[in-house]
Image (cartoon, rainbow, N blue to C red):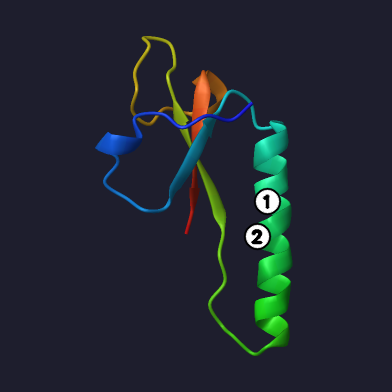
Amino acid sequence: MAHLKNWDKRKTLAYRFTVATKKDLDLLELKRLVRANNRKAKEWGHYTTQRVRLMARGGERGRNYSTPHANATHFDVYVH
């Protein structure tokens, strides 16, 4: 299940939520919505599309900054 994490300390509006796995249902639904939105944007002739980015967090030493996806304990989800 996705949850907001340290929302007050975020410096970007692109942050959406944090998930434990890449197979989280909320993440999959967000990806589906962004794909549908991008399809409509192309139909209407817009050239700007959105994308979902995952930033891996955690890792071997419990770091809360970027780490390789293979070592991640959780992922921050951003829409750009």
21 lies above or below 60: below
User: What residue do we see at 34% from left, 30% from top?
Assistant: 6
Residue 27, horizontal then vertical, whole percent: 65, 40
Residue 71, horizontal then vertical, whole percent: 51, 19
Which amino acid type is marked by label 1?
Lys
Apparent side of residue 25 relative to residue 73 in the rendered image (left or right): right
Q: Which mark is residue 52?
A: none
Residue 79, horizontal then vertical, whole percent: 50, 54
Is disc 1 in contact with disc 2, using a CB cutoff of under 8 Å? Answer: yes
13 lies above or below 10: below
15 lies above or below 46: above
Which amino acid type is marked by label 2?
Val
User: What residue do we see at 70% from left, 57% from top?
Assistant: 33
Residue occupied by mark 1: 31
| Quadrant position of residue 21 | top right
Residue occupied by mark 2: 34
